[in-house]
Image (cartoon, rainbow, N blue to C red):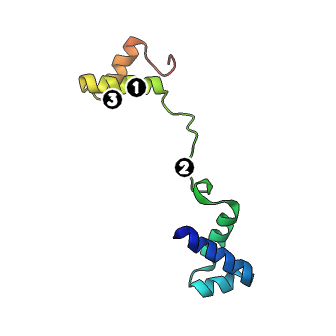
Amino acid sequence: MRELSRRALLRTYEERGSLSKLGQLYWRTLRTERDKAISGRRGGGAQGPNAPVQHSPRRTPLSLEVAIVAERKKTGYGPDRIARLLQARGQTDASS
């Protein structure tokens, strides 16, 4: 349904050639129409400007994350105690 309405908006825009006429026709603001038309022409969807970031350079390494979760399930310790325990074992993100 949403894709159909987007196609209808783009088709109307191409026919009328004016965003203000399109806005009047669909009772929307000019900015909304412009943004939707532009994002639809670029491919839009999940690749738009508000898409979640796919790269997290400061993310905890997976091996350390698994060790933390396992220790939490096994002992029920909190984050500070688990951090001290893993550091004592030499399991830090630098060594993982």
**Left-right relation of 46 to 92:** right
- Which residue is painted at 66% across and 70% down in the image? 37
Is 64 drawn above or below residue 24 in the view shown? above
Is 56 drawn above or below residue 22 in the view shown? above
Can you give x and y, in whole percent of width and height, for residue 78 in the image?
A: 28, 29
Q: Which residue is mark 1?
A: 66
**Left-right relation of 33 to 61:** right
Nearer to the camera, 94 or 16: 16
The quadrant holding residue 75 is top left
The span from disc 1 to disc 2 (Cα, nearest Å) is 24 Å
- Disc 1, SS: helix
Q: Which residue is mark 3?
A: 79
Q: Which mark is residue 52?
A: 2
**One can see residue 31 in this view:** no
The span from disc 3 to disc 1 (Cα, nearest Å) is 14 Å
Can you give x and y, in whole percent of width and height, for residue 68 in the image?
A: 37, 25
